[in-house]
Amino acid sequence: MRKTLPRNNILIGDDKAQLRFFQQYTGLEVETCEKVTDDLLLGKEDLLLRVFASHRIDISPDVKAKTGIWSADPIQKGSSGANAIVRYAASILGIAKIAREDVDRVSAQITKDGIDDIRGAVWHAVWLLSGDNAAPAKWSDPWKDPINWVDTTDITHRLHSLYRSLVGWAFLKTEDLRGVRQFGISPSQQQFLKQQNLDHRRVAESIRVLSTWKTRHTDPFVCALRISSIWS
């Protein structure tokens, strides 16, 4: 991935999602600068610099031609950044040419509540493009269908429900009836969970990922993607 970017890159703006994405993409830490000049860049490699406005970049044309300069403003509905996310999601699904109305529709949906994590926005777009997004009559489970278990119409509710089921399963396996009662697992749900022959390690890892999502309020689509990966 790093080979697709120039040796040095400059971000303009302060959107946290954009800054975090560039750090993840490059493996570098963002360094904030008051001003970027030729002296700061010449003879250097693997710099990821951030300024708050374009006029704080004062470099010669030759140096500029070898330096990546990127916007780090918030990604909004209809912006080039939002559209790029949708088109990349389409490429993941093998869609060679996506209709403009689909780009506009999905762009509006992924930016409706703001974008906190770009990778999460990509997978949100993938799910929105992958077919009918109506809530299923009955949810599947990731150990049965690692791809289609997610209800994208109410993903937060789905993740909370999955967390409750997995913790309930763990309580039942350890015969912790007090924990079962505290979690409010109904008799019918207990019967269902007892019939599930699950991998203990995958259950533990899923509970850890879901707990992190609940306590740190991370992106729900990134969380769902990790759950899918665990059970794939």
Image (cartoon, grey):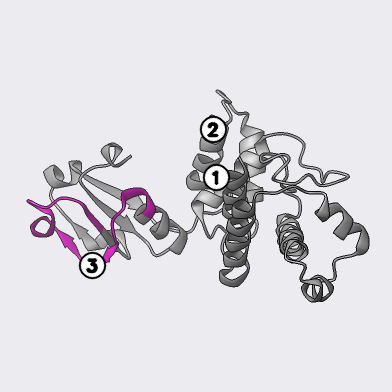
Q: Residue at x 12, y 59 (%)?
A: 40
Tag 2 residue = 92
Q: How many discs mark residues in the rendered view?
A: 3
Q: With respect to residue 34, does 96 lie above or below?
A: above
| Residue furthest front in the image | 175
The image quarter in which residue 174 lies = bottom right
Q: Earlier in the sequence, mark 2 or mark 1?
A: 2
- Label 2, label 3: how many angstroms apart (C-alpha)? 36 Å
Q: Is residue 34 magenta?
A: yes
Mark carried by residue 33: 3
Position of residue 68 in the picture relative to residue 225 (left or right) = left
Q: Nearer the viewer, residue 92 or 167?
A: 167
Q: Which quadrant of the figure has residue 229?
A: top right
Q: Which mark, residue 122? A: 1
Q: Position of residue 1 (x, y in %)?
A: 33, 39
Q: CA distance from mark 1 to mark 3?
A: 29 Å
How busy is the neighbourhood of tag 1: few (under 14 within 10 Å), some, or many (20 plus)?
Answer: many
Residue furthest top as drawn: 96
Q: Which residues are magenta?
A: 24-48
Rendered view: 192 above or below 173: above
Residue 84's disc is none
